[in-house]
Amino acid sequence: MTQPPASRDDARGASATFRAVLPPVHRAATVLFDDVDAMRRHDWRSREAFVYGREGTPTTRELEKQLAETEGARHALVLPSGLAGYSVVALALLQPGELIAMPVNGYGGGGQMADVLLRRLGIEVSVYEPTQPDTWAENIPAGTRLVWIEAPGSITMEVPDLTRLVAHARSVGAHVAIDNTYSAGLHLKPFDLGIDVSLQALTKFQSGASDVTLGSLSCVNEGLLTRLHETRHFLGMGVSADDAYLVLRGLPTMWLRYEQSARSGEQLAAWFRGRPGVQRVLHPAFEECPGHAHWKAHFTAAAGLFSVTLHESVDEARVKAFVEGLRHFPLGMSWGGHSSLALPYAATHNAAQRLRRLGEPVGAIIRFWVGLEPVEALLEDIAQAWGAAMNR
Ligand SMILES: Cc1ncc(COP(=O)(O)O)c(C=O)c1O
């Protein structure tokens, strides 16, 4: 038996008498038009009209609206991942022969994208040290077209002097983009600092459940938005309404999850302070973390994300034993979800090598994401795994 063909006027599931707390999920590739004239007028460049599912649905547009509001932007564009944000900004703003400056302590995926994809396209890539303003003239020279900032650094957690860095980037004529994932857009307002574009890996705090990858770019400038929007279109990047919904569901509780995780994170980070084998606790809210004063000046909270650098004498076997001995910190990428995570970086990792270059005698680094489990259980877990690993 075959299904009778749908008539043009079949109900599409809408109801004027039904309302729910969260917005509905509008799945669509095809978007229907009322008549031929309306169809002929359709233009993907319109950010208000609905023309094709890839260009946006009421669900993805609602998410964009809420994200822009959170970050104090005029507009936001959703993307299939946080990493996509790095590519879209670069391809929107750079031409062959132009220079992009990437922070040495930034998200590794963004740095690799520049190093491989952008170089292949003939774009020049410079890597700068955010903690050393006296090196910026050399590594963010006059004519630089785009400067990426990340605050705090992805593994090493230092916050640069944002005011000075933005002023330097502006003075050389560069656009400035920030990976603002750490603050979730709640605790650092990039547009107040004169930053042009803000990236969120919605994969982290906004979703809150480690079950979706999405990203967003937000900005206040209309011309810039048009460039980003058309680049997203030409790269064929769409976001499914189901994925957008998962983030919409997470947003109302994000501030509360952020607060809880921040509180537990500070307690856990404090546990490591002064412990034999620990070189330094890299938590932006702690005075011993490089850039603490800048964090204090610009952020209204720290996230439950921190790193611990270990003495060179703590060998790889003990690092592995510690991380594998944790019961409540499974091993895995990402952060921002309800489950805590621990991620070890070997003494040979770039981040550890860089810290040694900066004069810090570090071996391995362990980054902790602190989720929503009872903090007593997490503290107990760390203590048992640390004791067993260090007394081997
Ligand atoms: C700071 C930061 N920015 C961007 C990303 C990339 O996000 P996604 O995994 O959604 O591509 C990550 C992911 O780990 C990240 O930690």
Image: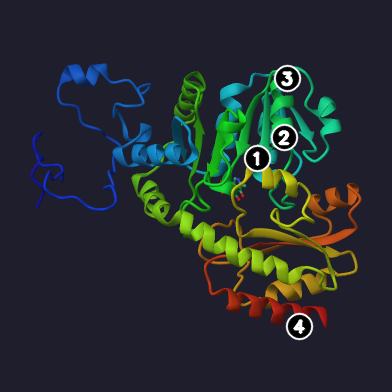
Q: Is residue 132 visible?
A: yes
On the image, the x and y values in percent for residue 42 come to 28, 21
Which residue type does callout 2 highlight? Met
On the image, the x and y values in percent for residue 323 come to 70, 71
Mark 4 or 1: the one toward you: 4
The residue wearing badge 3 is 171
Q: Is residue 323 above or below residue 223?
A: below
Q: Of label 1 and label 2, which has the lower sequence position? A: 2
Q: Are marks 3 and 4 in contact (CB under 8 Å)?
A: no
Horizontally, residue 307 falls left or right of residue 47, namely right
The crowd level at tag 4 (other Cα within 10 Å; few <14, some 14-19, many 20+) is: some
Mark 1 sits near ligand 1, with its Cβ under 8 Å away: yes
For the point 56% across and 46% down, which residue is it?
A: 187
| Residues at marks 1 and 2, CA–CA distance in whole angstroms | 8 Å
Which residue type does callout 1 highlight? Gly
Task: Give me the disc on residue 102.
Answer: 2
On the image, the x and y values in percent for residue 229 come to 46, 26
For the point 77% across and 38% down, which residue is it?
A: 130
Q: Are marks 4 and 1 in contact (CB under 8 Å)?
A: no
Q: Secondary structure at mark 1?
A: helix
